Amino acid sequence: MSIALKQVFNKDKTFRPKRKFEPGTQRFELHKRAQASLNSGVDLKAAVQLPSGEDQNDWVAVHVVDFFNRINLIYGTICEFCTERTCPVMSGGPKYEYRWQDDMKYKKPTALPAPQYMNLLMDWIEVQINNEDIFPTSVGVPFPKNFLQICKKILCRLFRVFVHVYIHHFDRIILMGAEAHVNTCYKHFYYFVTELNLIDRKELEPLKEMTTRMCN
C-alpha cells in the first residue's frame, strides 16, 4: 500500500473503534487467516472457503467483524462528501432506494438522507457485534440459534454501503487513489457472501454489471 493510501486509510478516518479479537484465541487465528487473504496475489475465491475442520459460525463471525471494520473505514474516507445536500436519500442510483427500520425508533421502513442512514446502520451493527449474547468472545460459549440470520441481515446492509459508495462516490475514491483497495475489499466480500449463500441474489442486483466484470 502506498504512503498516500495509508494516509487515506488511517485510524483517524475510521467511523468508530474497531472490534478486535484477543490474541491466542481460535477466533484470532481465523481473523489473521481472513486478513491474510487481502494480500496481493491471493486467490480470494479460494480464501473464503470454510477451512477444513473449522466451525462455520466462527468463520462467519470473524468475517462479519472484519467486513464491518473495512467497510466502515471505506465509508469514513468519503463521508465528508456524503451530505444531506448531496445525498438526500439513501440510494444506489435512480432504481434503488433503501429505507431504514430498526424496530426501535424506526418501526416502519423510513426514507432518510444517506449520512443519517449510514450512521444508524453502523451504530446498529456495532451494537450487534459487541453483544456477547450474539458474538460471544469466551471460549466454549455457543452462538445463538439465530446467529446466521443476524449475520445475513448485517451483511445485506453492509452491501448497501458498497452500492452507495460505488454509484454515488466512486469518483472520490479514484481521486484518493484507493480504487484498487476498495475493489479488493468488494471482491473479498462478494466471494464470501456468495460462497456461503449469506445474501439473497436479488439484493446484489444494483452492482450486478460491475460485479460480472470484476469477479467473473
Image (spheres, rainbow, N blue to C red):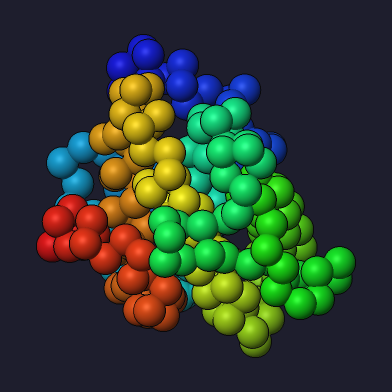
Determine the residue positioned at 55% across, 30% down. 81
Location of residue 163 in the rendering, given as x and y in whole percent from the top left corner: 42, 55
Residue 85 left/right relative to 71? right
Q: Which residue lies furthest to the right in this view?
A: 105
Residue 103 left/right relative to 212? right
Image position of 18 with respect to 130: above or below:
above
Image position of 56 with respect to 172: above or below:
below
**Quarter of the figure that contains the N terminus:** top left
Residue 81 left/right relative to 199? right
Task: Report which quarter residue 86 is drawn in.
Answer: top right
Location of residue 137 in the rendering, given as x and y in whole percent from the top left corner: 68, 60
Location of residue 58 in the rendering, given as x and y in whole percent from the top left corner: 52, 68
In the foreground, 116 or 6: 116
Task: Report which quarter residue 90 is drawn in.
Answer: bottom right
In the foreground, 85 or 180: 85
In the foreground, 162 or 64: 162
Q: Can residue 111 be seen in this view?
A: yes
Determine the residue positioned at 29% across, 44% down. 183
**How many numbered marks are there?**
0
Q: Can residue 70 be seen in this view?
A: no
Determine the residue positioned at 37% across, 22% down. 176
Q: Residue furthest bottom?
A: 145
**Quarter of the figure that contains the C terminus:** bottom left
Task: Report which quarter residue 92 is drawn in.
Answer: bottom left
In the foreground, 32 or 8: 8
Determine the residue positioned at 15% across, 41% down. 41
Image position of 140 with respect to 214: above or below:
below
